[in-house]
Amino acid sequence: MKLKSLSKEELESMSYDDIAYKIFEEEKKKLKLPDLFKKICKLLELDESEYEARIGDFFQLISRDQRFTMLDKGFWDLKDKYKTQIIMDNEEEDEEETVEETEDDTDVSDETDETYYDEDSDDDVEEDDLKDLVIITDDEDDEANIG
C-alpha cells in the first residue's frame, strides 16, 4: 500500500523507521537522512521546530535499524539492495614480503659468500676435530692477562 493513500491516523500509528522503509521502497533511490526525515515530517504534517527537535532521534533510530545501510557521502538506502561483500586486503602484507624478498636477493648477489663446505669430509670421522684445541687453566689465563 502506498504511503500517500494512508490516512494521517494510519501514518501516525507507524514508527519513523517503518515510514522511512516505505519511502525507500516507493522511491527506489538513496537519500540523505535530513531529506528523508523532511519527507516523513511532510507526511505527518510536522512543522520545522518538530523536525529540528526529532532529527537526532531519527538518526539514532535509522542507525540501529538493520534494514538500512549508510552509503558514501551521507546517503542511506535499504540494506537488501546491496550485496555484502567481504574483501580480504592482504596487499600490504604481500608488498612487505616482496620487498623483503627483493632485499634478500640483492644482499646475496652483492656480497660474496665466504663460507666454504668440504664436501669430501666425513662427519663420522673425528680424528682431527680436536687437534687445534688448546686448554687454558685459570692460572695460565691470569698470567696471560698480566703479562
Image: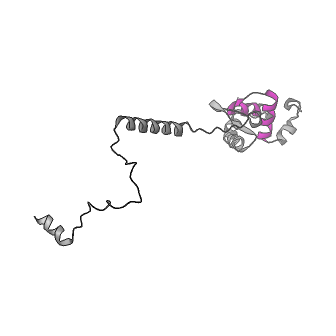
Residue shown at 59%/38% (left/top)? 89
* Front-most of residues 8 and 135: 135
Q: Where is residue 99 in the image (x, y as percent from the top left)?
A: 46, 36
* Residue 123, magenta (yes or no): no
Q: Please give left or right for residue 6 compared with residue 145 in the image.
A: right
Q: Position of residue 57 (x, y in %)?
A: 69, 43
Looking at the magenta stretch, what is its main secondary structure?
Answer: helix
Q: Which span is picked out in magenta?
A: 15-41
Q: Quadrant of the C terminus?
A: bottom left
Does the segment drawn in magenta span residue 26? yes
Residue 67 location, quadrant: top right
Residue name at image x 71 percent, y 29 percent: 31
Q: Image check: 120 left or right of 19?
A: left
Q: In which quarter of the image is residue 64?
A: top right
Q: In which quarter of the image is the N terminus?
A: top right
**What is the x, y in percent for residue 91?**
55, 36
Q: Which of 14 and 87 is in front in this view?
A: 87
Place residue 73 in its image quadrant: top right
Residue 85 location, x and y as percent? Answer: 69, 37
Q: Nearer the viewer, residue 81 or 7?
A: 81
- State left or right for residue 10 relative to residue 45: right
**Which residue corresponds to the image point at 33% horizontal and 38% vertical from the top-left?**
112
Which residue is farthest left?
147
Depth check, front residue: 95 or 42: 95
- Colour theme: one colour
